[in-house]
Image (cartoon, rainbow, N blue to C red):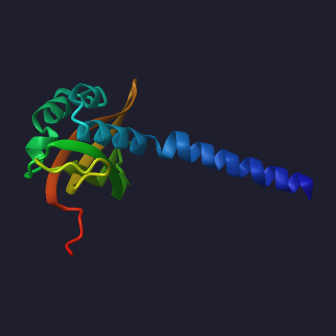
Amino acid sequence: MKRLLLVLLLAGAGYGAYRWFVEDAPGRVFHEFARLWALEDTPAAAALTTGDAARAAVESRILRGVVRAPMEALRGSRQVVESRERTADGAVSLTVQQFVFYDPPGITSGIGGAGVAIIRHVARLEKTADGWRVASWTPTFLDAHSRRESR
């Protein structure tokens, strides 16, 4: 009985390690890329790309250019994966919705942001010698609204 439990424990640990290091690696790279982009750290976000087209997209599609709402202070972001697909050539295509929390001009919330902008990212990640990198990326502005409840 103890051996069976040990085998099951090791199998579970092996599966978890496989998911972390192999299956989830492209998603982790994209989440870091999107986080850096939302912080307007263009050089760091561009470092997670491969190819001139992806680098040019990061440098030309900055956050405040994509979001059509006045933003004064950035307060963080979170992301939700809408879809994930592995292509025949081994690349991974992701569609991710990102919520960027911010303060509009004249409003200081302190923590969390008074407004939220919603952006949909469509990205293709490829495995390179440096690990997974964003090969193509398109952000689309969906909405921006106040986080405060009307009373």
Query: Along the line of sight, which residue is nearer the eye, 26 or 107?
Result: 107
Residue 3 shown left or right of residue 81 in the figure: right
Residue 6: % across, % down: 83, 50
Query: Along the line of sight, which residue is nearer the eye, 95 or 61?
Result: 61
User: Where 79 falls versus 90 (above or below)?
Assistant: below
Residue 114: % across, % down: 22, 55
Residue located 21% across and 75% down the image: 151
Quarter the N terminus occupies: bottom right
Query: Along the line of sight, which residue is nearer the eye, 58 or 99?
Result: 99
Indicate the quadrant where residue 145 lies.
Answer: bottom left
Residue 8 shown left or right of residue 82 in the figure: right
Residue 143: % across, % down: 15, 61
Indicate the quadrant where residue 57 lies.
Answer: top left
Residue 49: % across, % down: 27, 31
The image shows a total of numbered marks equal to 0
Residue located 63% across and 49% down the image: 15
Question: In the orientation shown, which residue stands out farthest toward the right?
Answer: 1
Residue located 14% across and 54% down the image: 141
User: Where 112 falls versus 148 (above or below)?
Assistant: above
